[in-house]
Amino acid sequence: MATDYDTPRDARDGDGGSDDSIEALKGRREDKQSPVVDADPEAAEGLELPGADLSGEELTVQVVPLQHDEFTCATCFLVHHRTRLGATDRDGRPACRDCAA
């Protein structure tokens, strides 16, 4: 059977609609929300807050100097292999293929 979707719908057609007002719907939504936050104190132990004092921490990162077959892009400042060299800018600085495009 063909359905005309442009005709006005009636709540009695069985589409599950109801004639609740917007205030009743808002009240029903607020009833489902709880103002209490379930906080797990053990889950927050691994989190660091912004501005936390990290002066006692020590970095363990090994810094490798720029290799002979690498260059630093003058636009994105990432280190790329020479095969990724796209072009040089007007000052003669190298740019990768992504930034040169």
Image (cartoon, rainbow, N blue to C red):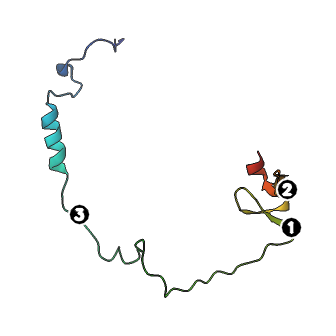
Secondary structure under the numbered disc 3 in the rendered image: loop
What percent of the width, then of the height, locates residue 27?
A: 13, 42
Is 49 left, or right, of 101 in this rendering? Answer: left
- The amino acid at mark 3 is Val
SS at mark 1?
Answer: loop
Query: Which residue is rendered at x = 24% and y = 17% of the image?
Result: 9
Give the CA separation, mark 2 to mark 3. 58 Å
Q: Is residue 80 above or below residue 26?
A: below
Residue ID for mark 2: 92
Question: Please, what is the three-letter code of the amino acid marked with disc 1?
Answer: Asp
Q: Which residue is mark 3?
A: 37
Question: Residue at label 1?
Answer: 69
Q: Tell me the kind of residue under disc 2.
A: Gly
Q: Are marks 2 and 1 in contact (CB under 8 Å)?
A: no
Contact between labelled residues 3 and 1, with CB atoms less than 8 Å apart? no
> Could you tell me residue 50's position as x and y percent?
42, 71
- Depth check, front residue: 35 or 53: 53
Above/below status of 19 relative to 4: below
Q: Position of residue 51 (x, y in %)?
A: 42, 74
What residue is at 51 percent from the left and 85 percent from the top? 57
Crowding around mark 3 (Cα neighbors within 10 Å: few <14, some 14 to 19, many 20+) is few
Q: Work out how far the residue at label 2 is from the one at label 1, CA to CA, in angstroms.
A: 18 Å
Marked residue nearer the N-terminal end (2 or 1): 1
Query: Horizontally, is 6 left or right of 30 in the view?
Result: right
The residue located at (81%, 64%) in the rendering is 71
Q: Nearer the viewer, residue 80 or 15?
A: 80
Where residue 2 appears, as percent x and y from the top left, is: 36, 11
Between disc 2 and disc 1, the foreground one is: 2
Left or right, 71 with respect to 13, comes to: right
Q: Residue furthest front?
A: 91
